[in-house]
Amino acid sequence: MTVQERDERDAKLFAADALREARSVMASPSTGSGYFMSVFTMLAIGALFPELLAETDAADD
């Protein structure tokens, strides 16, 4: 594994954790700024790793 591959893997892991937290914040009563930060997080992740935002189809499970 090259350094670039490792860095991309680590970035995706970090992005997946941030996405999970952003979705959690968006699903609960918001404080306002937390909601907007979650939206920003989702937009940034969508720009970098759009495959992480793909919704899984229940039929695929």
Image (cartoon, rainbow, N blue to C red):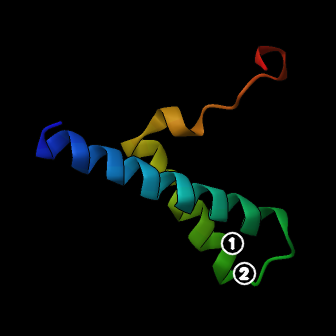
Q: Amino acid at mark 1?
A: Tyr
Q: Residue at x 77, y 22 (%)?
A: 57
Depth order, front residue of 38/5:
5
In this picture, is 60 found above or below 50? above
Give residue 34's quadrant in the image.
bottom right
Left or right of residue 9, residue 44 in this image: right
| Cα–Cα gap, marks 1 and 2 | 5 Å
Give residue 56's quadrant in the image.
top right
Q: Total number of numbered labels?
A: 2
Where is residue 58 drawn, in percent x and y? 83, 23
Contact? badges 1 and 2 (CB < 8 Å): yes
Instruction: Say what secondary structure mark 2 lies in.
Output: loop
Left or right of residue 6, residue 2 in this image: left
Crowding at label 1, few (<14), some or many (≥20) Cα neighbours within 10 Å?
Answer: some
Q: Amino acid at mark 2?
A: Gly
Instruction: Say what secondary structure mark 1 lies in.
Output: helix
Where is residue 14 drawn, in percent x and y? 44, 58
Give residue 17's quadrant in the image.
bottom right
Where is residue 18 drawn, in percent x and y? 54, 62
Depth order, front residue of 32/55:
55
Left or right of residue 47, residue 32 in this image: right
Q: Residue at x 37, y 44 (%)?
A: 48
Residue holding disc 2 = 32
Depth order, front residue of 35/14:
14
In this picture, is 27 found above or below 8? below
The numbered disc on residue 35 is 1
In this picture, is 9 found above or below 23? above
